[in-house]
Amino acid sequence: MLVDNGYETIAITRTLSPPYEDVPAWHKVDRVLQDREKDPEFIRKLKEMKPDIIVDLVNFNIEETEKIFKGFCESQLSHYLYCSSC
């Protein structure tokens, strides 16, 4: 939906697997390999992308949420949305 509405979209993933649905929009998404649990530089690398909005769908502990939130306090990030069980 983001791509179809003209947004530049980056999907950060731990492994490159096929999308759930092979729709044309996925061919316009930049897919970046990163693992927040294994890479101590994850937040720095994320900040280098200069996102306007982060939609975090795989954040399963509140400590990681706080790290990302604090890491982006002095940035141009307008929204940090997460869907989690925490």
Image (cartoon, rainbow, N blue to C red):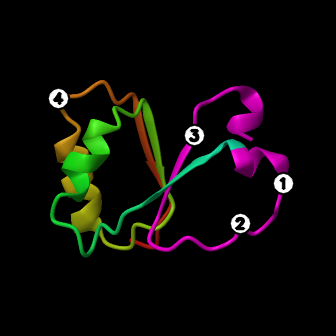
Query: In the picture, residue 33 is in which quadrant?
Result: bottom left
Horizontal side of residue 50 vs 81, given as left or right: left
* Separation of marks 2 and 1 at Cα, in angstroms: 8 Å
- Distance of mark 3 from mark 4, alpha carbons? 22 Å
Q: Amino acid at mark 3?
A: Thr
Q: Which residue is mark 1?
A: 23
Left or right of 80? Residue 42 is left
Q: Residue 50: x, y in percent?
A: 34, 32
Question: What range is drawn magenta here?
Answer: 1-27
Q: Residue at the location (46% across, 67% down)?
A: 58
- Which quarter shows the N terminus? top right
Q: Is residue 59 above or below residue 5?
A: below
Confirm whether the magenta stretch covers residue 20. yes
Query: Which residue is labeled 4 in the image?
Result: 74
The relative height of residue 75 versus residue 82 in the rendered view (above or below) is above
- Point 30% across, 47% down: residue: 46
Q: Nearer the viewer, mark 4 or mark 2?
A: 2
Amino acid at the residue labelled 1: Val
What is the distance, in whole Å, between disc 2 and disc 3 at their CAs? 14 Å
Q: Local crowd at mark 2 within 10 Å, few (<14), some, or many (≥20)?
A: few
Q: Residues within 10 Å of mark 4 (few under 14, many from 20)?
A: few
Q: Which mark is residue 61?
A: none
Q: Earlier in the sequence, mark 3 or mark 1?
A: 3
Image depth: mark 4 or mark 1 in front: 1
Determine which residue is flagged by label 3. 9
Name the amino acid, label 2: Pro
Circle nearer the N terminus (4, 1):
1
Foreground pick, 1 / 83? 1
